[in-house]
Amino acid sequence: MSASVAPWTMPPVTPQPANHDGTMEVAIVGPITGVETIAIGSAIMEVKRLRRAYGSGRWRKLKGFASVCLLDGTICKAAVHWYEAHGVGKKEMKIKRLLEE
């Protein structure tokens, strides 16, 4: 006797308002593609702040492309940047620019 499994659905997203520096918190809707490393460790200008805020680890600044949900509910492609460390995860993901589809 096998139970049918409902397909997985994305939970509702709640995008955040723009930050003081003009960037916007991101609600990622799909996978991040074209991931590239921008900087690692001491090459990151804000590595001291990241270690104080989130803990030590091998910090990296990364960039990629993803479908994002904007404040008005619009879903579009965007270039995104974020910081990541092993054992800490993705932090401070930002939309850098919206892309034409």
Image (cartoon, helix red, strand yellow):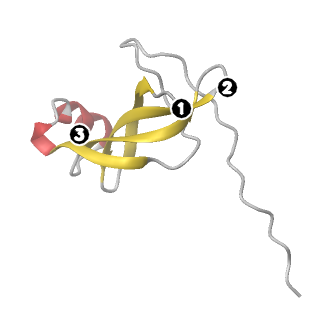
Residue receiving disc 3: 51
Q: Indicate the amino acid at tag 3.
A: Arg
Q: At which x and y percent is residue 1?
A: 89, 88
Residue receiving disc 2: 73
Q: At which x and y percent is residue 67?
A: 54, 38
* Residue furthest to the left: 42
Counting other residues with Cα less than 10 Å from the Cα at mark 3, is it few (<14), some (14-19), or many (20 or more)?
A: some
> Gap between marks 3 and 2, in whole Å?
33 Å
Q: Give the image quarter of residue 60.
A: top left
Establish if 67 lies above or below 22.
below
| In the displayed structure image, the side of residue 73 where residue 91 appears, left or right | left
- Residue depicted at x 49% and y 27%: 100
- Residue depicted at x 54% and y 17%: 17
Q: Give the image quarter of residue 61.
A: top left
Are the residues at dot 1 and dot 2 in contact (C-beta closer than 8 Å)? Answer: no
Residue receiving disc 1: 101
Counting other residues with Cα less than 10 Å from the Cα at mark 2, is it few (<14), some (14-19), or many (20 or more)?
A: few
Q: At which x and y percent is residue 57?
A: 23, 51
| In the displayed structure image, the side of residue 56 where residue 43 appears, left or right | left
Are the residues at dot 3 and dot 1 in contact (C-beta closer than 8 Å)? Answer: no
Counting other residues with Cα less than 10 Å from the Cα at mark 1, is it few (<14), some (14-19), or many (20 or more)?
A: few
Q: Which mark is residue 15?
A: none
- Residue depicted at x 51% and y 50%: 31
> Gap between marks 1 and 2, in whole Å?
17 Å
Q: Nearer the viewer, mark 1 or mark 2?
A: 1
- Residue depicted at x 34% and y 56%: 87
Q: Nearer the viewer, mark 3 or mark 2?
A: 2
Establish if 66 lies above or below 45.
below
Of the numbered discs 3 and 1, the one sitting upstream in the chain is 3
